[in-house]
Image (cartoon, coloured by chain):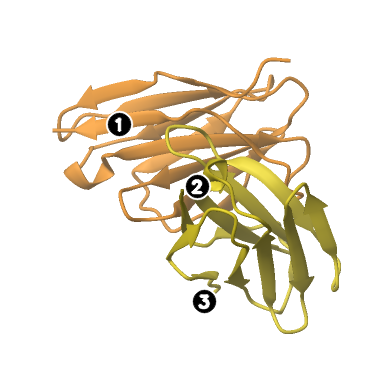
């Protein structure tokens, strides 16, 4: 079966712009979570969606937002980009929330210049 | 503030040696403890999910134990091989299903 698909793989944006990243979960998975990974840091949790509802949110500013559609696909949006937003953004899907067994996508590498 | 600590941050191990590292997590509101392996240029891959105090899980040469009362989990690798080189992440999920990740232990196997 197809894995978790993230698009685009690479993205270069300038400061002040906004960006939307997409994540298509494994078929049947209803939970999608988003993470940011910067050099030298572990995974920083952004948010988790389950059945179109945001269930948990990490400690990120309001510039980071997301949503989940009825087909479980999820998008993450970052507005007013800052240089510090340059990172690898990973999404992971699982059958049910919080129970583990997360399957990660390959990530979107965002560079803000 | 909920925090997950992993130690050591990095580890160099001779091929063939066994090794272990630690994940410490809050002992309250425990729901599950997850271990993942993250190889360079790949996505994190699930190793184990443990939910019960005293759980022990094994996958080949890798095993993990869980102590929810004192808030720690050990990951053991027996007879390390070069392909074991990766960052090993643990994550704690509480009863609200909030997932908190440790910063990982970077394991380097020296041939």
Q: Can residue B99 be seen in this view?
A: no
State left or right for residue A36 relative to residue A85: right
**x 37%, y 56%: residue:** A41
Q: Where in the figure is residue B82, as x and y percent of width and height?
A: 52, 44
Instruction: Say which mark, if any, is on residue A110.
Output: 1
Q: Which of B27 and B70 is in front in this view?
A: B70
Subunit that carries the residue with mark 1: A
Q: Give percent across and percent down for residue B76.
A: 67, 63
Q: Is residue B19 above or below residue A73?
A: below
- Residue B73 in percent (x, y) is at 69, 70
What hue does chain A carry in this figure?
orange
For the residues labelled 2 and 1, say whether their Cβ atoms are less than 8 Å apart.
no
- Discs 3/1, front: 1
SS class of the residue under badge 3? loop
Q: Mark 3 points at which residue?
A: B1
Chain in yellow?
B
**Considering only order in the chain, which callout, 2 or 3, is on the residue closer to the N terminus?**
3
Query: Which label lies toward us, 3 or 2?
Result: 2
Q: Distance between the residues labelled 3 and 2?
A: 28 Å
């Amino acid at each position: 079966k197809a894995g978790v698909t993230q698009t685009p793989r690479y993205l270069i944006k300038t400061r002040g712009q906004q960006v939307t990243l997409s994540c298509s979960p494994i078929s049947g998975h209803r939970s999608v979570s988003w993470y940011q990974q910067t050099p030298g840091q572990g995974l920083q949790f952004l948010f988790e969606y389950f059945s179109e509802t945001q269930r948990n949110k990490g400690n990120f500013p309001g510039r980071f937002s997301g949503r989940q559609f009825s087909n479980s696909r999820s998008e993450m949006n970052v507005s007013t980009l800052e240089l510090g937003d340059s990172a690898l953004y990973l999404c992971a899907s699982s059958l049910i929330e919080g129970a583990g067994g997360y399957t990660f996508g390959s990530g979107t590498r965002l560079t803000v210049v | 503030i909920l925090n997950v600590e992993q130690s050591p941050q990095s580890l160099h191990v001779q091929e063939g040696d066994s090794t272990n590292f630690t994940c410490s997590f809050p002992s309250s509101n425990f729901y599950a403890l997850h271990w993942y392996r993250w190889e360079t240029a790949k996505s994190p891959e699930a190793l184990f999910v443990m939910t019960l105090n005293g759980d022990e899980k094994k996958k080949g040469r890798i095993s993990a134990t869980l102590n929810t009362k004192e808030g720690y989990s050990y990951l053991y690798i027996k007879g390390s091989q070069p392909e074991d080189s990766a960052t090993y992440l643990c994550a704690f999920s509480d009863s609200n299903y909030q997932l908190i990740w440790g910063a990982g232990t970077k394991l380097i196997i020296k041939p």
